[in-house]
Image: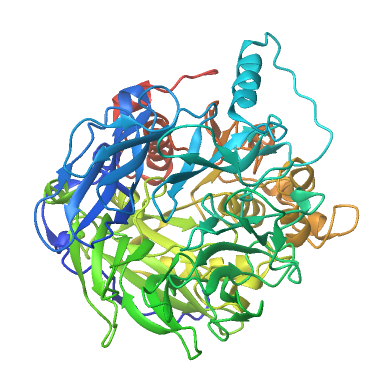
Amino acid sequence: MRDICARTIAGALLAGSAALAGAAGRPFRFEELAKVERIGGFDVSPDGKWIAYAVGTPVIAENRTRSAVWIAPARSGAPRRLTTGDKRDSDPAFSPDGLRIAFLSNRDGTSQIWMVDLAGGEPSKATSFPTEVSGFKWSPDGRWFLITSDVFPDCADAACLERKTKEREKSPTKARVAERLLFRHWDSWKEGLRTHVWKLPVSGGAGVDLTPGDRDAPPFDVGGALDFDVSPDGRDFVYASNADKVEALSTNADLWIRPFSGGGDARNLTASNRAFDGSPRFSPDGKWIAYRSQKKPGFESDLFRLSLYDRATGATRDLTSGFDDWVDDFRWAPDSKSLFFVTAQKGHGAVYRVGIDGGAPREVWRGGTPSQIALSPDGSEVFLAASTLSRPAEILAARASGAPVAAARPVARANDGLLAQIELGAVSERWTKSADGRDLHAWLVKPPGFDSSRKYPAVFLIHGGPQGAWNDAWSFRWNPQVFAAYGYVVYAANPRGSTGFGQKFVDEISRDWGGRVYDDLMRQADDLESLPFVDRAKIGAAGASYGGYMIAWILGHTDRFKALVCHDGVVETRSAAYETEELWFPTWEFGGWPWESDLYEKWNPMNFAANFKTPTLVVTSEKDFRVPFGQGLGLFTALQVRGVPSKLLTFSDEGHWVLKPGNSRVWHAVVMEWLSRWLGGAKPDEEALSAVYSITK
């Protein structure tokens, strides 16, 4: 065993959360996870008195999630539901006058904008766009909706869109023809459509395509679906788009500006940077455009910086120079003198404030992991949606001054009653050393009712990305608390390549997929084995995406684990490079194409199939275009031919993630049964297992 330096500290809980780990109650297995209500996107009213937010509820029997719009007082008081939530109501946004709330809903079959008065009443349909609305914003004057939708790029009006959509729906043939790359993405075929931003009158009437042309605007990845904004005076419209000829090979989104009236040509504001520029936001005084940027072309996981464009001079500058972690969601302060942004650092989330006149960013809040922030109209508070490993997302408010670092008060919660009835595992952190002296971080979650005198089986979790991290955050897919509830000590490792530990640490996994990171993980596995309450003979490992790749690499390089779970992992690096849809990814990670780089051969798990011994569950989905279906089938075939105990779980209606609640129930049942079979943890619900459709026995 290697020399290990480790220490344990208490896991952070959000301010105001109950100390749940010590409470007696039901174990938090999938049946309880499925009852957790999911707080989604939120908005603050213009007067700062109200918070509108969406709450989703899984419907297992129908394999879907329904959601409703709620409002809660920003200071104190009981929340109130505004919509029934029989279908999917989401993404609420207050009108600029604060009297109405617009939201997305599929209540009549397609996703459109609906509106409801703040005082309540029946919602009314606000748009009937021929194609589905995927996102929207209000214009500053409240007269327009700006929507994103996948449209036919040669259609200049809604009538054309409607005609072509109906023609396609009626066509008896469904053949596809492609003449360029990026013909499918994540889990969908492009179908000749482009994402565009249209402006639609709130009062009804004809709309205008603000991003015409045969390209996606906003871009399809790296940035976000709402990568656009309107100037406070309503004159200009800024958006992100990638104009490179072969989008599948490029991360070069740029900022473009044009008149909001729809006339005139778009002007490129960031042409000098060949890497990503996106997420533009006008300052409240209209003088600046803040945005996120990267510097390395072709590298989607380069450091995300917060940059500033001076509209008067055309000059740009980096506001976070010297800040070595990613800038995620950000917002302007009302006085236009500073910005607030979300980041992740060493497994924890934080909110920082940075002035436009320079100076180092200053921490305002820390605790859990925020997914979204907003500012109160007077700039005194930061509202955030945040979660921890022990608490689902809730909406909090913290002092914007951040001096000292502010505690947060709860504004909206959805699961207090459920959490009072269950018992969660205690969360702590582990630190150990890499071969080159780097600090390696991990989260440790103990089973509920933990008894230090016992020996427990354990599960070693490996995250995807590969540039990602296990943070102090809640998950509805790979939730360490759920694994712990089945009786396992859970060790969620953050080896090199993990975000939040400096960009150099992130960079060191590229072109070294099975090298130093594998050594890091084995040292962290040593740390797990060293725990006196862990049964060293009953440790399994599981991972998805890059984590799935590492499971396949482990298969060929060690038999230290008793069982493995490989979910949507790259297992044949050469074929995966040609089959995936975002081609900048393999060419960056492996230093070129397979005919140019020998790294595909060096880091190919299938070259070591002769060593496969460990029982392995393989999970793959037919609509996964990021790590295509054949990767999992190939691994399962190799395991079967080698005579290794193995099992294949596949979904015909999922992509890279298992998102539908009924499918999630099956996933948890099969995974937990596999781990129970080999490690001895609790077995899953037999009824859930009976829902699995076996194609061979």
Q: Residue at x 42, y 82 (%)?
A: 337
**In the rendered view, how is the structure colored?**
rainbow
Q: Quadrant of residue 215?
A: top right
Q: Residue at x 44, y 49 (%)?
A: 137
Residue drawn at 26 percent across, 52 percent down: 98
- x and y percent of residue 480 in the render? 36, 54
Q: Nearer the viewer, residue 605 or 622?
A: 622
- Whether residue 414 is visible here, answered yes or no, is no
Q: Residue at x 10, y 53 (%)?
A: 24
Residues 693 and 68: in front is 68
Q: Position of residue 652 (x, y in %)?
A: 55, 25
In this view, the residue in front, 676 or 272, is: 272
In the image: residue 584, left or right of residue 200: right
* Count of residue discs: 0
- Residue 451 x, y percent position in the rendering: 20, 61
Q: Is residue 313 visible?
A: yes
Residue 585 x/y as whole percent: 71, 55
Q: Is residue 199 above or below residue 697?
A: below
Q: Is residue 298 above or below residue 576?
A: below
The image quarter containing residue 109 is: top left
Q: Nearer the viewer, residue 429 or 372?
A: 372
Q: Residue furthest bottom?
A: 359
In the rendered view, tell whether residue 199 sits above or below residue 50.
Answer: above
- Furthest residue in direction right, as rendered: 595
Asked if 229 appears above or below 161 in the picture, the reply is below
